[in-house]
Image (cartoon, helix red, strand yellow):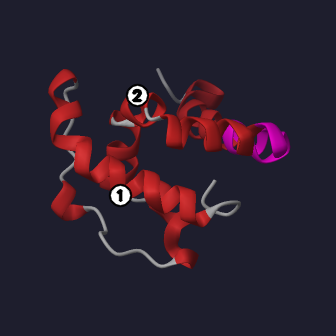
Amino acid sequence: MAALDPDLFREIYDFSRGHYEEDRASYHVSAQTDRAPEAVGEAELPALLEQFDAREILHVTFGSVLKETRFRNRLMDLLREHPEHYATGLEKHFLRHLEPFANGGGR
């Protein structure tokens, strides 16, 4: 999403930073908003998913993001218009989680 619609991603990221403290109450998490980048240039937006605090903030607040019609509709439209980007991102995400278990490494 950051590459396809940077403005939407930035809006969601800003919204998530603002809702993190409330939403984190239902999670056992360690991210801190003061460790997550605040002002992020367009070229750096995709890298937020590689930064622990920013990624965890986005993860924890995703339910709140989806409750917001202004985000949900635009996000769903973007996913429908670019299913190949979604599939590639999803594959990368799952591989990151599964890789430690490859070749018996998770025992």
Left or right of residue 4: residue 17: left
The answer to whether one can see residue 46 in this image is no
Residue type highlighted by circle 1: Asp
Report if residue 14 lies within the magenta region.
no
Report the side of 38 relative to 92 (left or right). Answer: left
Residue drawn at (53%, 30%) of the image:
105
Q: Quadrant of residue 67?
A: top left
Could you say whether the residue bearing mark 2 is in a helix, strand or loop?
helix
x, y (%) of residue 106?
A: 49, 25
Above or below for 77 versus 48:
above
Q: Secondary structure at mark 1?
A: helix
Q: Position of residue 43 (x, y in %)?
A: 57, 77
Q: Label 1 to label 2, Cα distance in Å?
A: 15 Å
Query: Residue 60 at what x, y percent from top left?
Result: 33, 34
Going 83% across and 44% down the picture, which residue do you hit? Answer: 81
Return the residue at label 1: 14
* Towards the viewer: 107 or 86: 86
Q: Residue at x 65, y 61 (%)?
A: 5
Q: Quadrant of residue 61?
A: top left
Residue named by callout 2: 63
Image: magenta residue range: 80-91
Q: Residue at x 46, y 20 (%)?
A: 107
In the image, residue 32 sits, relative to residue 48, either above or below, namely above
> Residue type at mark 2?
Gly
Q: Position of 17 compared to 72: left or right? A: left
Give the mark nearer the N terminus: 1 vs 2. 1
Between 101 and 41, which is closer to the camera in this rendering? 41
Q: Position of residue 23 (x, y in %)?
A: 23, 32
